[in-house]
Amino acid sequence: MFQHHFQSQRPQTTAHLAQTMTLLSLTSDELRQQIESELASNPALEMVEERRCPTCRRMLPGKSPCPVCSQPTLAQSDEPLVFISPRDDYFTVGGALGTEDLPEDTFSSSCEELPEYVLRQIAPDLSQEDRRLAAYLLTHLNEDGLLTTTLFEVARYFHFPLSQVERVQRIIQRADPIGVGSCTPQEALLVQLDILADANPVPEMARRIILDGMDLLSRRQYSELARLFKVSLRQIQPAVKFVSDNLNPFPARSHWGDVRQPTAANVEVYHRPDIIISFQNMNENGPLVVEIIMPVAGTLRVNPLFKEAVHGSSDEKREDWKSDLERASLFVKCIQQRNHTMQRLLQRVVSIQKEFILRGDKHLKPITRASFSRELGVHESTISRAVANKTIQLPNRKIIPMSEFFDRSLNVRTVLKEFIEHELRPLSDTELAGLLEKNGFSVARRTVAKYRAMEGILPAHLRQAGAAT
DNA sequence: CTATGGCACGGATT
DNA sequence: AATCCGTGCCATAG
């Protein structure tokens, strides 16, 4: 039914469908490459710059007010606000379109708002002069929230004494993503540790392993670490756990992978999300704003002048150009199709998983891709493609793979973890299964065991009793 | 006998 | 069509 409508509305070839499918499965970064190469090879395509929001620099299609920071409009609807957001952060840094040669960590969309966010927190406490300094420092952060220049450079640039720069840096480091503006991950950890130490007891080993064992720590070579300090593995264990649980060497980055067992290789860390969810106007009670990133400097369209010219001319080139036109319009349609699908998908997903987004893992509703495909009237595989390989940034700056929205067991695992954390005596898997059952999660005993393993929790007889946090 | 981990089957996902 | 994930069944450890 909808399928028919869908196809008759767009009487395209199978090529169209195929291309849309391909585009759908691309991440924003890959999409950028696609668009760039298409743009370069096809003269009929052009990019039109959009108007920018004066405050947040987002590009706004049409004349709509900025959906992210416009205060008054947009009623308090419960529905999330989903829109396509062209972001050219990737380009402005390098100046040119080819940014391939830029180092990985030059910039990222996720840190665009960070400087402003931090500055807003600390600005009231700063003098005019320091504010300028802070602003400068904050524009030299990489995507991890670490400084890309040295304090010395900055001091020289401003002709300020180094001590002054250091003072401002210290203030920045204590602002919200604690440790932001540090020069190294190590420094960030130390700052975080200091701040935590004010309020809570911290393992005395923690400071030492960060200070002298940073190298080994980051490579998770704990036994080496123990040897370095001439203590047993058991003795440094609490400190290591403390550090990995509570500290984050990349202040702007959501999570530091999962620091569990020494499970061999590096854990994947995400940056440059494909989708960003935030609160409208940073208001925690406001509606959610969902940006689907289009990593280009505007909107793509068929160049009307080119079209005109082709119709007018009778060159022998005319046939070539006609095919260019054809291809261009096809490409644009595909992009639009992609965006449309993403938009509808996100609208629904965010609306359903709002609790999860706001309150955390426990509230994830186990939904399936299949149910969405029915709801949106598209094929299952369409949803799969749209979800696969994409990452999404939550309002709390965590970046998670989009597939997490469809994790069938995350909520159960989280609750399970809580039970085990709060248990008074080590509960067996069977008991845990029963406990979960009572709370509305019906899982087999065998599955409890699997989840435990997934979370790196030891079996009951190896856990020590009465672990209260 | 109880608690767990290994293997394999069926449905969901890709 | 190939792969992943939750579960049931069974062997093994305590």
Image: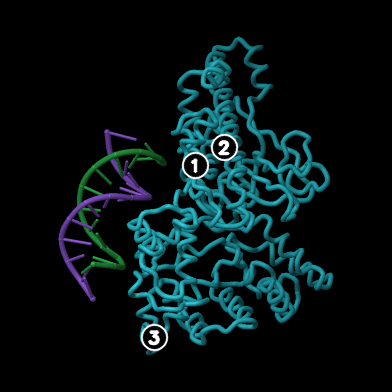
Chain colours: A cyan, B green, C purple
Question: Residue A29 placed where, x, y %?
Answer: 53, 45
- The chain that hosts pointer 1 is A
Q: Amino acid at mark 3?
A: Leu
Picture quadrant where residue A60 is located = top right
Contact between marks 2 and 1 (CB within 8 A): the answer is yes
Q: Describe the element under mark 1 as helix, strand or loop.
A: helix
Q: Which is more toward the observer, A392 or A217?
A: A392
Q: Nearer the viewer, residue A151 or A21?
A: A21
Mark 1 residue crowding within 10 angstroms, few (<14) / some (14–19) / many (20+) = many
Tell whether A421 sits left or right of A10: left
Whole-angstrom CA distance, mark 2 to mark 1, is 9 Å
For the residue marked with disc 1, what is the amino acid?
Answer: Val
Q: Residue at x 39, y 69 (%)?
A: A427
Disc 2: CA contacts within 10 A as few (<14), some (14-19) or many (>=20): many
Q: Nearer the viewer, mark 2 or mark 3?
A: 2
- Considering the numbered disc 3 on the image, is that residue within a helix, a strand or a loop? helix
In the displayed structure, does residue A108 sit left or right of residue A64?
Answer: left
Using the numbered discs, state the Cα–Cα distance from disc 2 to disc 3 in whole angstroms. 52 Å
> Which residue shows up at 83% across the image and 73% down it?
A127
Residue A228: mark in rendering: 3
Q: Position of residue A158 (x, y in %)?
A: 75, 71
Residue position marked by numbered label 2 in the rendering: A345
Which of disc 3 and disc 2 is earlier in sequence?
3
Amino acid at dot 2: Leu
Task: Report the Cα–Cα distance between label 3 and label 1.
Answer: 45 Å
**Where's residue A391, x and y in %?**
53, 49
Crowding near the residue tagged with mark 3, few <14, some 14–19, many ≥20 C-alpha atoms within 10 Å: few
| Labels 3 and 1: the sequence-earlier one | 3
Looking at the rendered image, the disc whose residue lies closer to the viewer, 3 or 1, is: 1
Q: Which label is found at residue A387?
A: 1
